[in-house]
Image (tube, rainbow, N blue to C red):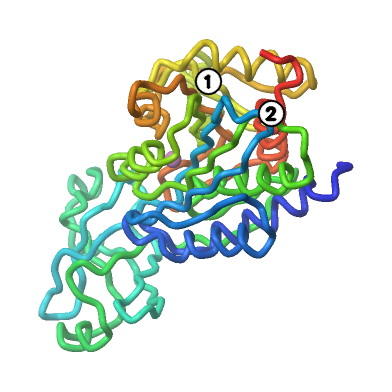
Amino acid sequence: MKSEILNIENIKALQRKLSSLFGVSGFEEDVSSFILSEIESKGLADKAWIDPLGNVLAVKKGNDGQKRILLDAHTDEIGFMISHIEKTGFLRFVPIGSWDTRILLGQTVIIRSESGEVIHGIIGSKPPHLTSVNERKKIVEINNLYIDIGMGSKDEVLNGNINIGTVGTLYSPFEEFPNNMVRGKAFDDRTGCNVLLHIMMLLKEKSEIKDTTLFNFAVQEERGRVGAITGAFNLNPTMGLAIENTTAADVPGIKESEIPVYIGKGPAITVADKSIISSPKVNRRLIKNAEHEKIPFQIKKPMYGYTDAGRIQVTREGVPSSVVSVPCRYIHSSTSLLKLEDIYETIRLIDVFIRNPVNF
Ligand code: CO
């Protein structure tokens, strides 16, 4: 891998860092401030700032600037919020964003106290010895689960600065698997943030870019795709791309017709998801440029999931938009698994899309 900026080691290091940051929807400050400091310290944009909702917005001016391309990746991750504290010190919680609730029982969680300390907990439910065979066959409903943080009373919890409204997420350390596969939490959508920061680093070196590039590191995607709305309004693009992490269901027991994307086959271009029919014009610019530079890509089967692109396309008088995703297994569970080459090829695809050598 030739480029000094674009190589697997740099992608992995940034993925590790971004994944480790705490950023449950509505509480993205750690992620936003890290991203802004990267942009500012490396001089990656003509202008960068944090808007009132917490989006990191940035502008990289093109020579011509007639076309304004928005790249959007969300900074938030799914998590939970404490909804009740039992007298005995156990915590009840409600999900933030959509969880695969089958996997919650027995998980380790991290809770960030109101004063910023990180506390570990375990998700428990009625013990197996006390449940009937029939009960054990059922998926435990989230309102029958609780979090045990080892504290013995409500007062102890409150003194630890944990209260109703305190948020947390599942604990999942970053680990390297064979074949440049990595696992970790919040890959949805710190992977997109990784892609955007790499694009900014690549653009920094270039003076001949025609179109202006706009960046929204958007908050609260998992709770109604909120940051995408205000960020796109502010940046006023003429074309939009959401960079996401999407379900690679290339695992045993799934019919080929139901596998949206595959690990290792490069970036996935969306033709339609539940929030958008992608602009064929934007997709053609992606595909023609990918073919020109021999970048592998796949077309994601419709229609799975919602993305920020659905919000971007209805900004102001309308913005032709699409989605490019890095394939990822076990999305919306405690841990995700992806292949670093898929991020690498996604960065190459977005980079060539902006440079647009085929002049589409
Ligand atoms: Co996402």
Q: State how far apart marks 2 and 1 are (Cα).
A: 29 Å
Q: Secondary structure at mark 1?
A: strand
Q: Which residue is mark 2?
A: 210
Q: Secondary structure at mark 2?
A: loop
Is the shortest distance between ligand 1 and the CB of mark 1 under 8 Å? no
Q: In the image, is 246 to the left or to the right of 148?
A: right
The residue lying at 34 percent from left, 42 percent from top is 230
Cβ–Cβ under 8 Å for marks 2 and 1: no
2 vs 1, front mark: 2
The residue lying at 24 percent from left, 61 percent from top is 81
Observer-nearest of 99 and 17: 17
In the rendered structure, which amino acid carries the disc numbered 2? Answer: Lys
Q: In the image, is 108 to the left or to the right of 157?
A: right
Up-down relation of residue 250 to residue 197 (above or below): above
Residue 278 coordinates in the image, percent (x, y): 45, 17
Q: Which residue is mark 1?
A: 300
Up-down relation of residue 126 to residue 194 (above or below): below
Residue 26, quarter of picture: bottom left
> Which residue sits furthest right?
2
Quadrant housing the N terminus? top right
Observer-nearest of 72 and 147: 72
Residue 338 coordinates in the image, percent (x, y): 61, 42
Quadrant housing the C terminus? top right
Residue 161 coordinates in the image, percent (x, y): 26, 82
Residue 19, quarter of picture: bottom right
Q: In the image, is 321 to the left or to the right of 299?
A: left
The tag on residue 264 is none
Label 1: how many Cα within 10 Å (few below 14, some 14–19, many 20+)? many
Label 2: how many Cα within 10 Å (few below 14, some 14–19, many 20+)? some
In the rendered structure, which amino acid carries the disc numbered 1? Answer: Lys
Name the quarter showing ligand 1: top left
